Amino acid sequence: MPAAPAAWATRVRIDAVVHHDGQTFLTWTSSNGPGTTYWLYRSDLPISNSSDLAAATLVGYVGDSTWCDRRLSALTGTLYSYAVDSLASPLTPGQGLFVATPAVNGSSYYAVTVQGPGGTEEKTITAGWNTLGSPVIEHLATPRPVFQRALDIPPLGAVSIYTLWTSHQATSLFPAMSNRASLPYDCAVTPGGSPPQNSLMVIMHARGGNFMQGVYPTSHPGQWVLSLDDPVDTRELNTFWYGYHENYNLELWTNPAPTLGVVQDYTLRRVLHTLLWARRQFGVDTTRVYSFGISMGAIGGILAAWRAPGLFAAIMGIVPKFDFSFITDPLPSSLFNPGNVLRDNCDRLWGAVGTNLITGEGGPVFNELNAATYAAWIQPMWVPPLIAFSGRNDDVVGWAEKIPYYTAMRATRQGGAYFWDPRQHLDNAIASWVPMQDPEYLYRFRTNLSFPALSNGSADGNPGDGDPAVGDSIGTINGYVEWDTSLVDQPRRWQTTLRTRDLTTRWQTMPAPESVTVDVTPRRLQSLVVAADSAYSYTVARLPDSVVVQQGVVVADSLPLLTVPGVTVYRSGSVLRLTALGNYGGPTTAVGDPRVAPGRPAIALAPNPARGAVSLRLAWPRAEEARVALYDAAGRLVRSIFHGVPPPQQSLGIEREGLSAGLYFVVATQHGTRVVKRVAVLR
């Protein structure tokens, strides 16, 4: 070991460098105190002097005490340090840690420099101290949360704590999840059972909460729990499980509202990445993954499920918010109205509603954060069943914003069940539907089971116009109708049994009608093939005598979606059967020049199936904002192809690179209308 440099107080000594799972963990020892900043540099060649440092790439910086898990320590009152691997010893006070996420395979040299509080960066390089003498071999891979420790939490027993270090630079396997390098986020895993008792509940905390509050499972046998965290050390406290502007300063207590630039869904990406890791790591039943949350926790579940519907079987949310662009709640005290605290938080995270900055997802941020708009965008795809409970006097997330959301869900035939009562934001003496707020109900759903999305039910309540004094004080949409989970889902046949059900409030049972009518749209289909313009016969048979009370033919629309209108549902049960009859109105639009139907965009694509790039030709009926996007068969947004005001005729392309073989959907949307074309990508 060479002699220590004379100005040791401004230098560091690198202790170790470890690379695993696509990340490089560099640790050092320093005697510098609070307020010190450490700068990390990388090069393909040795960094032996100041000239080498000048030619190296600045990877990022970290502050002091990066050995310490400050979040967990603050939550538990016990000082905890990080470990760089599950088998490594915890770091000790005085050590520093930086986690780099390389984008390519290769050999890297690293160096660490120091900047004291209010001082300048000390860039002197001393071999054997603040620079690597030998390179670290790095491999592009998918980073994983690193096991830190097991905490004994009565009465649960051992709960495992993991930490994921995020990066501001995306790789092909790891999207950017923060706007700073080496930013750690904890999560907790409560172990469950083995098959068949190995479902997974994803818990996201409310605003101002933390991941240690969500470790408690329901009474469902064998349930695993993944509890996630969404902290920022600013006055915003959290990011509403979405993200923040690319230039948002995580070290500045009060940020200005951005007026330019891009809003990034950093947090949402981390949520989905961590969920995918948990599915692989713990051997859970991937058909039985659910989310339950309250307030901001409900928002997180909804955002995640709508971005990646194939990952969730069902969602339950208590007092969620559906539309962050809504700024005209009739209650002046509503916290998302202009000038109130939560609207100010949104402005600083994402910019003002009027600015409506573009996002990393491709669309304007307040369109991406409006569930009614999102429902229209993804109408051809299903979203998991959502059961939501809201308060008419909720002046936190608001009540009036629910009305257009309910309307959109009915219009897009996405289903779900919605309940409201006179409650304020948190459960109180007038929260009528508390007995129905049981996450155990979610376990009847599976991602490998289709379901009937309900709309236009005759027993639906009247939510009013957004004024708390107008409409039913206690009500539900789709709440009175339920279906058996033993559906028939075959290539040419689909069948379900529907029943009315009584509902329970705190004070009484609300009996269902003996019969109701409701429109039924099969969703999350596993085998039934629904083709645009094709016909399907249907019958509705009353139970228990199996008398056919309705029958007819329905034709799939261009999306293609199939809806049976006005199905009569009895308390004793009704069996709805659908059988494919074949093409009804001739072939759908062939590949070639698209023909514009009145008021609707049109798509022609070739080749299909495709082994290489796909060419798109689009015809637009209006010179208005339009969107073209590609979705996979699970309903996940794969890429945004176009967003803006198009010419009347437009040619676009879809590159094959990065697309695995499978079925995809091209969705063109303009002025509330949309057209969908399926494309098969071959190996």
Image (tube, grey):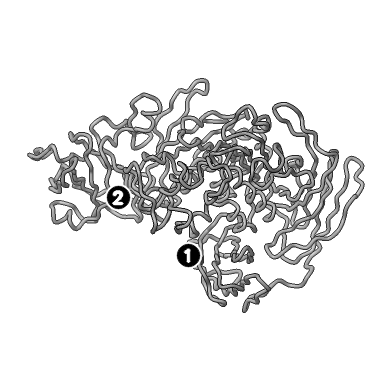
Does residue 162 sit above or below 350 in this rendering? above
Taking the image as drawn, is residue 365 in sight?
yes
x, y (%) of residue 68? 31, 32
Q: Is the C terminus in the top left, top right, bottom left or bottom right quadrant?
A: bottom right
Task: Answer with left or right where residue 425 lies relative to residue 168.
Answer: right
Q: Is the N terminus in the top left, top right, bottom left or bottom right quadrant?
A: top left
Amino acid carrying label 1: it is: Glu
Identify residue for label 1.
657
x, y (%) of residue 393? 61, 37
Residue 674: which quarter of the image? bottom right
| Circle nearer the viewer, 1 or 2 | 1
x, y (%) of residue 22? 37, 48
Task: Answer with left or right where residue 652 lies relative to residue 449.
Answer: left
Does residue 291 sit above or below 75 in this rendering? below
Amino acid carrying label 2: it is: Ile
Towards the viewer: 354 or 550: 354
Give the residue drawn at x 13%, y 52%.
Answer: 49
Give the residue drawn at x 63%, y 30%.
Answer: 220
Identify residue for label 2.
137
Give the residue drawn at x 28%, y 53%.
Answer: 107
Direction left: furthest residue: 6
Indicate the secondary structure of the residue bearing disc 1. Answer: loop
Res. 376 mark: none
Give the residue drawn at x 27%, y 43%.
Answer: 62
- Tell me if label 1 and label 2 are in contact, CB under 8 Å: no
